[in-house]
Image (cartoon, grey):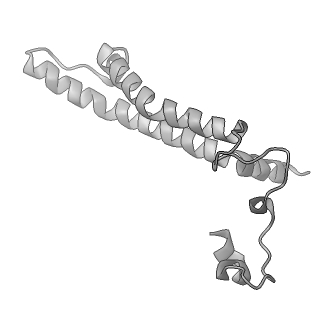
């Protein structure tokens, strides 16, 4: 297996985790970028001076906002995604039996009479 195939397989197997981690980092950067502006406005209203980004990242204001967002959004959804990928719950519509092949695991067959048109067409339309 070439290194290109290994990279593609890694991305294919872990795409959801990669996207969620990337979004988390993007939103964290956005929070770190906009947080000092809000915090400095509050400081100016209280007659205090402004602070820079690196100083802000060490304030209780940033930590509080970070953990509130982390707890309510990323922690819940992150664990849900990881658990539904790796754990099995009998009878759950979101869990696949890890011991048997299911209909959704097979490759689309364009020769089937009831195949959707993107499967019959193939190419870039199927990739989308």
Horizontal arrangement in the rendering, residue 45 relative to residue 94 (left or right): left
Please tell me which residue is depicted at 79% across the width and 57% down the height of the picture: 102
118 sits to left or right of 77: right
Residue 106 x %, y %: 81, 63
The furthest residue to the right = 1
Considering only vertical position in the picture, is 44 above or below 125? above
Q: Is residue 4 above or below residue 32?
A: below
Q: Residue at x 57, y 37 (%)?
A: 80
Q: Given the current orientation, which residue lies at the most extreme front position? A: 91
Percent position (x, y) of residue 125?
Answer: 64, 76
Tell me the quarter of the picture where residue 66 sits: top left
15 vs 36, left or right, is: right
Residue 86 appears at what percent x and percent y? 72, 37
Nearer to us in this view, 43 or 15:
15
Check the image and report above or below for 127 versus 104: below
Give the percent coordinates (x, y) of residue 87.
Answer: 71, 36
The one of 76 and 9 positioned closer to us in this rendering: 76
Among the 4 quarters of the image, the one containing residue 73: top left
Q: Considering the image in quadrants, where does the C terminus appear? A: bottom right
Instruction: Please name the residue shown 80% across and 44% down the image.
Output: 98
Q: Name the one closer to the observer, 4 or 109.
A: 109
> Count of labels shown?
0
What residue lies at 65% left-to-right and 40% top-to-bottom?
Answer: 84
């Amino acid at each position: 297996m070439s290194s290109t195939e290994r990279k593609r397989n890694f991305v294919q197997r872990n795409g959801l985790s990669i996207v969620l981690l990337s979004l988390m980092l993007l939103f964290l950067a956005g929070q770190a970028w906009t947080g000092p502006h809000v915090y400095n406005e509050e400081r100016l209203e209280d007659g205090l001076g402004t602070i820079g980004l690196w100083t802000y990242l060490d304030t209780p204001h940033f930590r509080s906002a970070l953990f509130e967002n982390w707890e309510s959004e990323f922690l819940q959804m992150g664990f849900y995604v990881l658990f539904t990928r790796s754990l099995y719950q009998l009878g759950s519509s979101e869990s696949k039996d890890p011991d048997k092949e299911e209909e959704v695991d097979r490759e689309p067959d364009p020769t089937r009479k009831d195949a959707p048109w993107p499967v019959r067409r193939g190419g870039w339309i199927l990739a989308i």
